[in-house]
Image: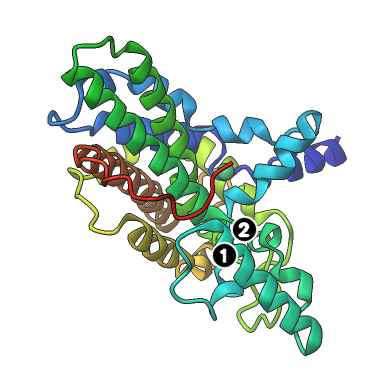
Amino acid sequence: MALIALVLLQSVAALAWGNEGHTAINRVAAQKIPASMPRFLRRAVAEIAYLGPEPDSWRSPSEFALKNAQEPDHFIDLERVSWLDPLPPGRYEFYRKLYDKRASTLAHPDNDHPDDYLPERVGLQPYITIEVYGRLKAAFREYRQRLATHQPTHAAQQAIIFYAGWLGHYVADGSQPLHTTIQYNGWVGPNPNGYTTQHTIHAQFETAYVAANITANDFAGLVKIPERLDDPFTQYIAYLKQSNGLVENVYGLEKAGGFTGKGSPAAFDFTTHRLAAGSQMLLNLWYTAWLESAAPLPEHGPPASATK
Ligand SMILES: [Zn+2]
């Protein structure tokens, strides 16, 4: 029985925030959509909340190609890209930089394992996030155009709700410090503070502790009106770095027993603020996508490269 429990625990270890946390982050953000945004979206709280955990249902071995393609979207090991600042704006430039790094590490394999620089090992968190953000912005633009030309908007609304909910998953993953680090599930390397090396801290924090102790109401009050982001990608990276800066806090709280059973006040305060940070960034991205979607498309010049 203990073995079964352990296997179950490990199988959910990579889900990030678990179903409860993901649903709550999306729900709180949706409840805070301002009156200046479309009414259909403000009424879609239940649908957006439902979609919070959606990408975690794409990780089953029964759909191998899907699992394989999108699993790296849920995390980034920022320590592995500390030499790459700023991160390039597109995922294929990022791949190229990583393969170059891997090649130079193959030539000088001092401390690092070359394969640690494979894109799928480093993780692609900020790229999928900005890509889904782009889909949402494009869908908002289509919706505006249909409104302006008096065409039906129902299908465009459905697309927007899906993209908004889907986006929420990755933004929420980014607020979980253990999704931004090589210290993802048990401390590795020098360990002067004696943090746990067990492969259980990830699920204990984000799934078991949150499910047992925190609801959407516990952090809704921490989420403020949205702010327009001047540079969504750069600001999203800063958000991930801030999250990464809190990795040791998670380990310290675990060491003090903060996530065991009912947990500690310090663990509750820390976790509610992390969940709120996820909702706030999500709300800011929705708001920014809506505002940016009003800008006319740039004039089409000659294509930069041939498109297939
Ligand atoms: Zn995830």
Q: Amino acid at mark 1?
A: Phe
Dot 1 alpha-carbon crowd within 10 angstroms: few under 14, some 14 to 19, many 20 or more: some
Pinpoint residue 164: horizontal percent, then vertical percent. 38, 32
Q: Is residue 180 left or right of residue 285?
A: right
Disc assigned to residue 94: 1
Q: Quadrant of ligand 1?
A: top right
Q: Secondary structure at mark 2?
A: loop
Which image quadrant for residue 61? top right
Rendered residue at 18%/30% (across/down): 37
Is 27 above or below relative to 71?
above
How far apart in space, not on screen, are marks 1 and 2 (Cα)?
A: 11 Å
Residue 193 appears in the picture as rendered: yes
Residue located beneath label 2 in the image? 123
Pinpoint residue 229: horizontal percent, then vertical percent. 24, 54
**Image quadrant for the C terminus?**
top right
Residue 176 appears in the picture as rendered: no
Rendered residue at 20%/24% (across/down): 38
Q: Amino acid at mark 2?
A: Gly
Pinpoint residue 300: horizontal percent, then vertical percent. 32, 45
Q: Is residue 55 left or right of residue 186?
A: left
Pinpoint residue 7: horizontal percent, then vertical percent. 81, 41
Rendered residue at 13%/28% (across/down): 35
Q: Secondary structure at mark 1?
A: helix
Nearest the camera: 56 or 264?
56
Q: Residue furthest front?
A: 302
Dot 2 alpha-carbon crowd within 10 angstroms: few under 14, some 14 to 19, many 20 or more: many
Rendered residue at 66%/80% (across/down): 191
Q: Which is in the foreground here, disc 1 or disc 2?
A: 1
**Image quadrant for the N terminus?**
top right
Nearest the camera: 184 or 307?
307
